[in-house]
Structures are given as structure tokens and as C-alpha cells.
Image (cartoon, rainbow, N blue to C red):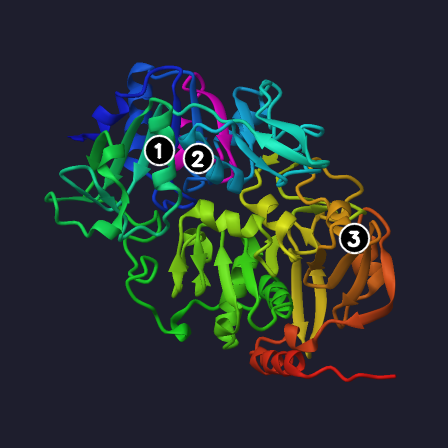
């Protein structure tokens, strides 16, 4: 192992290389100093060019950091990731076909690192079937020049599967907290663990170079052996950045690092808006002892609602980055967690998810069609990507999709337990057709999986290939405020119910009492009749 500067590390990348960067979202374990140096080298001298840039999770500050560092014409040839939204400068490059772009499921990219490391012929999974990932649809492509088939359909024992093909890694830029003189890497201050060792092994199997950015150096033999996340035998170079932050937004939080737990009342509360109404109604789907996932967007607010209502310990909340228990973070630090009971490497979290380990998943939506199919990936002029959405939605026993009923200027008001639409959103989310299928409601129903769509004014469920309105908010007219704001006519349940009036008051709802009643009902013995 050799200690080098970020500029020296950037000089290791040759034109045409496949470069892998670790990390998640807003700076979590992202080797930012290395990426910044790589960008500076290109801007100063025009090299390296025609890179393939691979990152498992969307990385960036939604401005100029993270993956945006390589989003320059001539520098970037192809992008393989699960999400582009964190690096918005990449989006027009994909739209304009300036780059070859694929957005694969986050779990697939995380898990395939182990397959590349072991020299296996790729990842075989059912995740992605009957979505735009399926080669019978788009094969995960987001640009016309993305010709290569990164995924293929196959049949094993009469069942359909997808094989995601392995790809080479010439240079891996990874991150930890401390490196010793032998290159052993620990991650004690990091906000996530990611797939660091698998990525290092994958690069080594590809004949590539492994560079790890850290905050500090330690003497040989002084790091606790069980704390080492990347053994020195896999590390070629170390870059030391003493100013390394835990995330872009947070210099260091001991709670995010798992060093201590903060009091639940210290967790941030949501302001009383339509987003909190939705998060509260979604939280009503929680059941005692359920193992849950909280996705991005409005769904991240469920942990804040659960903390405020005193029910955070009633269930186990998880997120795809590998946290089990506690409260997944919201806002710019989304992807991290506080007060968690365990943190595992991301591929193993997705093994659990893909194996049906989730009782309830809470996810967001952008567009929904008449069948209940969901698009979160590409709409209008925006390419978001899928993140862990497909792994989660396709394998959880129940999915609660959360979002505002319309978008763009929506304004609501609440009084006396009733909802009023002050200004309607300009854009419909319930549309006749969607551009990309990220959740296939018909396939889910065939497999016996449940789904619920929660908005601020109505709750809908997919039944027999169509959407049905089952609840509306007090004060809302089903024809004017629901059906007229959809691009198609849904079914309306003959047993249409009112949403709970407590949702529309800023006072706490008393969900702890509701949870106690659910526990009692679950423990009640069955009565035999007849």
C-alpha cells in the first residue's frame, strides 16, 4: 500500500477505464476528494476521456459534487448506476444521448459486486421481471446509444429469471475512516457501510486498482482486527483527507456513526403539511413487530411520525443502506440512520429484502396508471432512476406507496378535522399511461402481494387489474377532488370510508393507543364456531 495525494490517485485513471465510486446520496462514504481531483485533471488537461462511471447508489449534492464530477462531455462515455437524481448534470447527458446510460436496481448493483469478485457469470435474480429493467421492455436503458444488453431473460426449472451480466472495474475509489500502514481500513465514523469489501474484491478480480480515501492514518497493528472493513491485501493506494466529512451536510454525528443513541424526543419532527398528513396515514399501516423499509421522499418522514407518536420501538424500521432498527434519516442525510440496532453491508440487506424479509415497505410514487403500475424512474424531462425501489417493491409482502395526489403548486388547508384543497396541483400523477414500469401491479397481485396508495385526500388499492378508491378525506368531494384530478376513471368502493379525522389536525394522533389495540387483537385467541 502506498499513500498518495488525491491528484496522484486521479492520475491512475486512464482514458477508456471503468471507474467505480463508493457511497450513497448526500456524501455518505463518497470519496469526494478523489472525484474532485479526477474532475480537475480533466478540466485542466482533457484527460481521462471516455470513462465508464459506475456507482451503486445515486451520489451527489444535487449540484456539483459526487457523480456530477465526471458529468462532462468527452470525459464520460457511459453511466451505470441505480439513480441519476443526485447528479442532475448527468440527466440532460442521458436525455440528449451524449452518454450511454443504464439505471439498474440498487440491490442488483450492490449484490453483483460479489459475483464479479468471485468470477461468477453474473447475478441471477427475479428482481426486475415485468418492469422496464426486463429486456422485453427497456433492459434498464435510459439513452438510445446504450446498446449493450446488460441483462438477459432466462428460464430455470420452468420459471423466468434475469441474469445481470458482470462488468470490468479498472479503478475503484472507495472510502473509510482510518487506514493503518498496511492499508487496513476501518469505517468507524462513516454514515454507511455500503459494499466496500465486495467492491475492492471485484476490482482486484478485474485486475483493477483499489484506492481508498480516509480521514487519518494509524500505526501498523493498532486497529482492532474485527473493525477492519477492507483488508490491506486488497488496497493499493490510500488518499488522506483530514477535512473528510461524514456527509455533505454533517461534519460528524456520533449517532449516525453508531457511537451513541440520542433521545427519541431529540429526533426531528415534521412540520404540519400535506406531507405529514400522508406520512401519518402511511404510518397507520404499521403493525406491531413488523419489519419495514422506509424509502425516499415522503416515506422517510414515517420514522419522524413514529418517534413523535411514541411507536418507534413497536416495529423494526430498516433502509436499504443496511440499517436495522432505529430511525432512518430524512432530508439531506437520507440514507443514514440514528439509534439503529445493527448496521450490515448493503448486499446482505438486499439478500434479506429479495428473500421476502420485509413485512411492509413504504415507498414513494411519481406516476400511476389505471392498472396500479408505478413509475418513479423517468417522466417528463426528468430521469431519476430506481434506486432500491424495484428490489423492495417486488419482494415485500405489502407495499404502501405515498405521495401527493397532484404535483406542482398544490396547497391544502386543514380545520376541524377536514381537508380543503386551496390550490390544485398543475400536474396529474394518476395518468392514462406511464413511460416506465417500475412496479407491476398485475404481476404483484398474481404473486399474492398487497399494495396501498396513500395521498393527502384519498387512499386507493389495486384490485383485479384496476385501481379502486377506498377512502377519502373529510371535506373532499370524490368526483371533484379525486376522479376529476385523474387521467382515468377509477373504481369507487361501494364501502367508501372517510380517512381518520386525526390526520388533519396538528396535534399528535395517539397512534400508540392504536398500536396497543393491534397488539391485543393479534394476541386474541380464535373462536371456533359451528
Density class for disc 1 (Cα within 10 Å; few <14, some 14-19, many ≥20) is many
- Mark 1 falls on what kind of element? helix
Residue at the spot of label 2: 113
- The residue that appears at 43% across and 52% down in the rendered structure is 332
Residue at the spot of label 3: 485
Pointers 1 and 2 in contact (C-beta within 8 Å): yes
Q: Which mark is residue 78?
A: none
- Give the label, 2 or 3, closer to the camera: 2
CA separation in Å, label 1 and label 3: 51 Å
Q: Quadrant of the N terminus?
A: top left
Pointers 1 and 3 in contact (C-beta within 8 Å): no
- The residue that appears at 39% across and 16% down in the rendered structure is 49
Direction front: furthest residue: 157
Give the residues in magenta.
66-88
Density class for disc 3 (Cα within 10 Å; few <14, some 14-19, many ≥20) is many
Q: Is residue 243 left or right of residue 50?
A: left
Q: Locate residue 380, reporting x and y percent.
A: 66, 36
- Give the label, 1 or 3, closer to the camera: 1
Direction left: furthest residue: 219
Location of residue 473 (image quadrant): bottom right
**Could you tell which of marks 1 and 3 lies nearer the N-terminus?**
1
Q: Is residue 256 left or right of residue 363?
A: left
**Residue 72 falls inside the magenta stretch:** yes
Q: Nearer the viewer, residue 68 or 105?
A: 105
CA separation in Å, label 2 and label 3: 44 Å
Q: Which mark is residue 201?
A: 1
Q: Locate residue 211, reporting x and y percent.
A: 27, 31
Amino acid at each position: 500500500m502506498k499513500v498518495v495525494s488525491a491528484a496522484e490517485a486521479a492520475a491512475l485513471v486512464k482514458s477508456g477505464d471503468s471507474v467505480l465510486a463508493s457511497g450513497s446520496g448526500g456524501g455518505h462514504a463518497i470519496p469526494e476528494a478523489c472525484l474532485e481531483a479526477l474532475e480537475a485533471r480533466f478540466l485542466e488537461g482533457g484527460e481521462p476521456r471516455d470513462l465508464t462511471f459506475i456507482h451503486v447508489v445515486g451520489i451527489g449534492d444535487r449540484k456539483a459534487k459526487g457523480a456530477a464530477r465526471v458529468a462532462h462531455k468527452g470525459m464520460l462515455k457511459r453511466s451505470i448506476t441505480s439513480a441519476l437524481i443526485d447528479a442532475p448534470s448527468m440527466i440532460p447527458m442521458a436525455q440528449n444521448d451524449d452518454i450511454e446510460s443504464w439505471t439498474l436496481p440498487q440491490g442488483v448493483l450492490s449484490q453483483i459486486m460479489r459475483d464479479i469478485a468471485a468470477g461468477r457469470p453474473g447475478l441471477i435474480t427475479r428482481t426486475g421481471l415485468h418492469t422496464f429493467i426486463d429486456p422485453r421492455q427497456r433492459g434498464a436503458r435510459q439513452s438510445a446509444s446504450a446498446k449493450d444488453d446488460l441483462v438477459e431473460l432466462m428460464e430455470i426449472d420452468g420459471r423466468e429469471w434475469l441474469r445481470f451480466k458482470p462488468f470490468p472495474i479498472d479503478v475503484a475509489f472507495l472510502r473509510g475512516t482510518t487506514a493503518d500502514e498496511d492499508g487496513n481500513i476501518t469505517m468507524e465514523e462513516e454514515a454507511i457501510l455500503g459494499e466496500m469489501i465486495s467492491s475492492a474484491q471485484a476490482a482486484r478480480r478485474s485486475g483493477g486498482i483499489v484506492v481508498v480515501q480516509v480521514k487519518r492514518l494509524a500505526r501498523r497493528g493498532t486497529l482492532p482486527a474485527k473493525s477492519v472493513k477492507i483488508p490491506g491485501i486488497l488496497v493499493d493506494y490510500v488518499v488522506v483527507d483530514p477535512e473528510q466529512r461524514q456527509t455533505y451536510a454533517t461534519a460528524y454525528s456520533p449517532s449516525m456513526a453508531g457511537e451513541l443513541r440520542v433521545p427519541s424526543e431529540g429526533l426531528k419532527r415534521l412540520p404540519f403539511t400535506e406531507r405529514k398528513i400522508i406520512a401519518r396515514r402511511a404510518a397507520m399501516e404499521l403493525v406491531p413487530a413488523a419489519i419495514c423499509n422506509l424509502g425516499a421522499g415522503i416515506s422517510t418522514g414515517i420514522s419522524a411520525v413514529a418517534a413523535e407518536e411514541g411507536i418507534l420501538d413497536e416495529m423494526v424500521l430498516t433502509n436499504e443502506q443496511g440499517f436495522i432498527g432505529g430511525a432512518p434519516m430524512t432530508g439531506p442525510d437520507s440514507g443514514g440512520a440514528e439509534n439503529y440496532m445493527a448496521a450490515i453491508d448493503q448486499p446482505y440487506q438486499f439478500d434479506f429484502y429479495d428473500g421476502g424479509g420485509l413485512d411492509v415497505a413504504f415507498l414513494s410514487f411519481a406516476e400511476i396508471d389505471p392498472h396500479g403500475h408505478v413509475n418513479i424512474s423517468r417522466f417528463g424531462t426528468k430521469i431519476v432512476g430506481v434506486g432500491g425501489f424495484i428490489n423492495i417493491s417486488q419482494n415485500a409482502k405489502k407495499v404502501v406507496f405515498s405521495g401527493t395526489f397532484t404535483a406542482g403548486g398544490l396547497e391544502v388547508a386543514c380545520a376541524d378535522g377536514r381537508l380543503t384543497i386551496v390550490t390544485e396541483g398543475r400536474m396529474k400523477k394518476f395518468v392514462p399511461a406511464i413511460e416506465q414500469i417500475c412496479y407491476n401491479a398485475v404481476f404483484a397481485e398474481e404473486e399474492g402481494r398487497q399494495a396501498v396508495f396513500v395521498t393527502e385526500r384519498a387512499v386507493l388499492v389495486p384490485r383485479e387489474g384496476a385501481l379502486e378508491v377506498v377512502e377519502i378525506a373529510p371535506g373532499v368531494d370524490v368526483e371533484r377532488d379525486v376522479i376529476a384530478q385523474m387521467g382515468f376513471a377509477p373504481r369507487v368502493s361501494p364501502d367508501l370510508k372517510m380517512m381518520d379525522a386525526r390526520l388533519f389536525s396538528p396535534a399528535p394522533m395517539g397512534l400508540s393507543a392504536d398500536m396497543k389495540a393491534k397488539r391485543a387483537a393479534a394476541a386474541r385467541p380464535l373462536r371456533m364456531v359451528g
